[in-house]
Amino acid sequence: MSHPFLQFRARDEAEMAQLAGLIAERTKNGDTLLLEGEIGAGKSAFARGFIRAKLGRLEDVPSPTFTIVQVYNSDGGEIWHCDLYRLTHPDEALELGLDEAFETAICLVEWPDRLGEEQPETALRLSFAARETHHDVSISGADEWADRLKGLDAKA
């Protein structure tokens, strides 16, 4: 596992959406973002901001807790928002077609630990932690991501 190369603090959902939008600008089809953290840590708020930024419009973005996967069609391709909390084995994620989506879509995966060894090696990992007055976000990933996100800390 790589060490975090960026750290952010979001005081509210608007700041989380701003961070998500800045990262969304730097993503392309075939990218996977693994969103880690306990319930209430900010994963869904980040995903909502990311999807709205990528679509370029205010869209209802419900948490896919019960549907497991919600797919959005953008001008550039599909965005998969996955909440794997209820899965008990990595094979269940593959049955959803997630392995193919990792190659062709932008995938936001909440509870990525449910993927086990099936987590894409090239994924960007965002670890969320809820604090009393804010949310902390630590970002890590392959060197390619460090290069793509260079300068992000100055904008957020």
Image (cartoon, grey):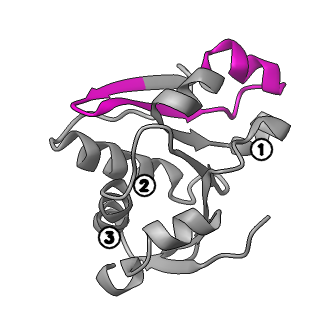
For mark 2, does the 10 Å Cα neighbourhood hold few (<14), some (14 to 19), or many (20 or more) residues?
Answer: many
As drawn, the residue found furthest toward the bottom would be 154
Residue denoted by label 2: 46
Labels 1, 3: front one: 1
Task: Indicate the amino acid at tag 2.
Answer: Phe
Whether residue 119 sits left or right of residue 20 in the image: it is right
State how far apart marks 1 and 3 are (Cα).
26 Å
State how far apart marks 2 and 3 are (Cα).
9 Å
Q: Earlier in the sequence, mark 1 or mark 3?
A: 3
Residue 15's spot in the image, x, y percent?
Answer: 32, 70
Residue denoted by label 3: 15
- The quarter of the image holding the N terminus is bottom right
Task: Indicate the amino acid at tag 1.
Answer: Asp
Whether residue 144 sits left or right of residue 80 in the image: it is right
Report helix, strand or loop for mark 1. Answer: helix
Residue 35's spot in the image, x, y percent?
Answer: 59, 52
Whether residue 19 sits left or right of residue 52 in the image: it is right
Magenta-drawn stretch contains 50: no
State how far apart marks 1 and 2 are (Cα).
18 Å
Q: Earlier in the sequence, mark 2 or mark 3?
A: 3
As drawn, the residue found furthest toward the left would be 57
Magenta-drawn stretch contains 79: yes
Residue denoted by label 1: 113
Q: Which residues are the magenta region?
A: 71-97
Residue 89's spot in the image, x, y percent?
Answer: 84, 25
Task: Indicate the amino acid at tag 3.
Answer: Glu
Residue at image location 32% in from the left, 60% down from the top: 17
